[in-house]
Image (cartoon, helix red, strand yellow):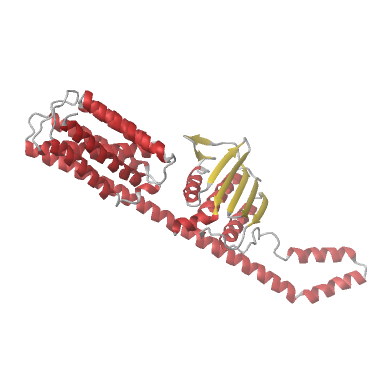
Amino acid sequence: MNLVFAVYMAEQAFIVFAMDKFMKVFFEKRRTPFYIYALSYAVYLTGTVSAFYFLKIPLVNLLCSTAGIFLVTLNHESPVKRKITAVCVIYAFLFITDIFVASLSGFVFSSPVAETDYDAVFGYVAIGLLFYLEAVLAQNFRNIRKESPVSGLYWFSTFAVPLLSVYIAVQLLEAENTGHAELIASIAAIFLLNVLTFYLYDSLSAAYTHRLDAEIYEKEREYYYSQCVLMRESAEDLRAFRHDIKNNLSVLDSYIRQNRTREAEEYLQRLIGGVSDGTDYSVTGNIAFDSIINYKLRKAEENNAEIQVNISVPQEMGIDAADAVAILGNLLDNALDAVSGTGAGRIRLDVEYSKGRVLIYLENTFDGRIDCRNGEFVSVKSGSGHGYGLRNVRRALVKYKGSMDIKYTDTVFSVDILMYAGAGQEKKD
C-alpha cells in the first residue's frame, strides 16, 4: 500500500464523518438499526476506494460516490425527492471542494472519462478536512430537516443548482482557454452560489414553519372562542329555564288538572326545544379537545350529517393544544369536506385515552372519488380533500411517536391513530 492510497483512505474516513453530519442536516429520523447504517457507509467506502485504486477515472468516481450517498440516505425516513436533493447537495459540495483544492495545487484535469494521475498527498488531506468543516458549518441550518412544505419550485431550485454547478465546473475544467486564476475564482463563485442556495432553502423552510404555526394558532383561538360562546349560550339557556321553571310548571299543572293532555304535551315539547340539547359533543374538561370537536361537529350539523361521538380523555394528558389542533382539526376538516359532497353523510369519531396512549378513530362517508399518488392522498373531491391535512397530521404525530392507518372503501374513509401522550413532553424537555 503506497502513501497516496493510504492518505486517500484517510480522506474518505473524514468524508464519512462529514456525510454523517450532512445527513443530520437533511433528515430528522433514521429508520434502520445502527449496524445497517454503519454497513451502508462501509459499502460506500468499499465502492469509492475500489474505484480509486483500480480505475482513477473521475466519471466512475462520481457515479460510485453518488450511488453510495444515495444508499446511505435510504436509512432515513423521508420522501424520495428529499433524498435526491441531499445526494445532489452533498456531492456538489464534495466535488467542488475536490476540484478547488486540486486547482489551487496547479493540477490540470484532462477529461472526466480519462484516468487521472492526481497524487498530491496534501491535496487529499485538505479535501477531507475542508469537506468536514463544511459539514460542521452546515449543521447551523436547522430548518431543512423539519420537512416543511416548501413549494415545488423552491425544492427544484435546491435540487437543480448543485447539479448544474457540477456540470459547469466540469465544463470549466475542460475549457482550454480558461486561465488558472480565472478557474479558481469561478470554482469559488460556484461554491458560494451553492452555499447561498442552501441558506435560502433553510430560510424558506423556517418561514413556512412559522406560517404553519401561525395558522394553527389562529385556528386554536377560533376553536377556543367558539367553545366559550357555546358554553355561554348553554349557561344562558339554563338560567332562563331555571328562572321560569315555576311558571312553566304551574301552566303544566293547570293543563293536567283540566285533563288537557294534548296541550300539556305540546307545551312540554316547546320547553324541551327551548333548552340547548345537541351541541356539546365533547364535555371532557380538556379544553383543546372539547373546543375543536364541538366547533367542527356543529358545522357537520349544518350539513345534516349523522354524527356518532365517543370521547373519553382526561383534562390533562400531555398533548399540546397546537398539536391537538393539527391532528383533530385537520382530520375533522377533511371529514367535513367529504360529507358536504354527499348530501347527508355520516361522521363517527372515537377518542380514547388509556395508560398514556391516545387512540383516535375517525370515519366518514364520501363520494368515492380519491386520488392516491406515491402513497399520498392528494384529493377526495375537486378543490379539496384529505391530502394536505393528512400530511400535517403525520408531521404532528412524529412528536408523539404516533402512527396512522388509513383505509377506505367505495363509500367510507377511515383514519386510525395511535400516539403516546407523554412522548411530546419528553421530546420538549
Residue 171, position in %: x, y?
A: 16, 31
Relative to the observer, which residue lies in front, 258 or 185?
185
Residue 325, position in %: x, y?
A: 52, 56
Residue drawn at x 56%, y 60% as measured from the top left: 317
Residue drawn at x 62%, y 45% as measured from the top left: 363
Whether residue 75 can be seen here: no
From what the image shows, is residue 332 above or below residue 173?
Answer: below
From what the image shows, is residue 17 above or below residue 114?
Answer: below
Q: In this rendering, would 148 be left or right of 327? A: left
Residue 265, position in %: x, y?
A: 84, 63
Q: Report the quarter where the C terminus lies.
A: bottom left
Q: Report the quarter where the N terminus lies.
A: top left
Q: In this rendering, would 424 be left or right of 286? A: left
Residue 388, position in %: x, y?
A: 48, 45
From what the image shows, is residue 38 above or below residue 236?
Answer: above
Whether residue 57 can be seen here: yes
Relative to the observer, which residue lies in front, 114 or 34?
34
Residue found at the far front of this picture: 1
Number of disc labels: 0
**Splitting the image into 4 quarters, where does residue 173 fall?**
top left
Q: In this rendering, would 193 be left or right of 24? A: left
